[in-house]
Image (tube, rainbow, N blue to C red):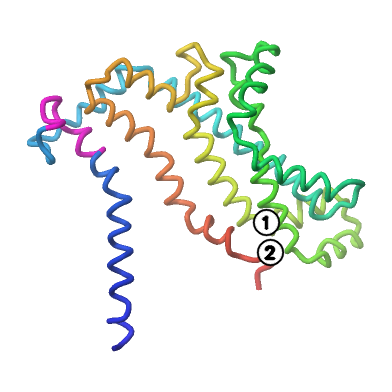
Amino acid sequence: MNAHHRAWPRHLLLSAGSLTVLAPFAWMLLTSVKSRSEVFTTILPTSWHWENYAQAWQAAPFTRYYINSIIMTVAIVAGHLLLDAMAAYAFARLDFPGKKTLFFVLLATMMVPTFVTIIPAFALITVLDWIDSYAALIVPRLADVFGIVLLRQYIATIPRELEDAARIDGCTRFGVFVRIVLPLARPALATLAVFSMLFAWNDFLWPLLVTNDDGMRTIQVGLSVFQGRYGTSWHLLMAGTLTATAPTVLMFLIFQRSLIRGLTAGGVKE
């Protein structure tokens, strides 16, 4: 049996898995272009109603939802890239008292369920009077333990000799971080950016808690309100959901190579 014949079961299994993943998106697309009467009666629409997207966009303030989500997502991704990288470099390269203990405590926080920390975080936001503000959406999530651990493990693979050579040439510690470490850690930073973007854009619970004003809601919270308001109009709901899903799918398709390289590559290129 040649290699081609041995590979077909694996290709068949992968194709079946791909169809399973794509099926919900296909159902969303087909439902979004059906008439209201065809939602549960036909698989394929008899006519394609692309005007459903315009109706869904006008039925709720989606423009404002998108603006809020974009502002929140960009700020959170920038915060993760900056603050997580600085903390990761400190844990990977600097020597200070209690370093290992602090890192283990940091790792332990990853085992704490998010729901445990939501109540005290919400109480703090309330005391600061940040409800219905970008500060409430952004500040509590500017840093992330996962990002610190990911970057710390990646930075640890970068040879110290490169940093020592830069220090001998007169580069400061911050200069080494900016000019040596960050450029070499670009694959890991790209990976963190993708994960952070997906997390921020798709987050639902926290924006739901800290926003009461419809003008401050994000796209995911806006969809839930839209569903409650038009619960029987599934064709409009699917149109709104598809427009909310498109940015994350596009982001993944553009940066999938960087994502894979960041998870598998070493710190130094040959």
The stretch of residues the image draws in magenta is 28-40
Q: Is residue 165 visible?
A: yes
The residue nearer to you, when weighing 157 against 179, is: 157
Identify the amino acid type marked 2.
Gly
As drawn, 197 above or below 3 = above
Q: Is residue 135 visible?
A: no
Task: Provide the secondary structure element on which disc 1 rests.
Answer: loop
User: Around disc 1, counting alpha carbons within 10 Å, would you say few (fewer than 14), some (14 to 19), or many (20 or more)?
Assistant: many
Q: Give the image location of residue 80, x and y in percent.
A: 65, 40
Badge number at residue 185: 1
Whichever of labels 2 and 1 marks the residue nearer the N terminus, that label is: 1
As drawn, 162 above or below 37 = below
> Dominant secondary structure of the magenta stretch?
helix
Q: Give the image location of residue 47, x and y in percent.
A: 9, 35
**Left of 173 or right of it: where is 24?**
left
Whether the magenta-drawn stretch holds residue 29 is answered as yes
Residue contact between numbered discs 2 and 1, judged by CB atoms under 8 Å: yes
Please identify the quadrant where the C terminus is shown. Answer: bottom right
Task: Provide the secondary structure element on which disc 2 rests.
Answer: loop
Please identify the quadrant where the N terminus is shown. Answer: bottom left
Identify the amino acid type marked 1.
Ala
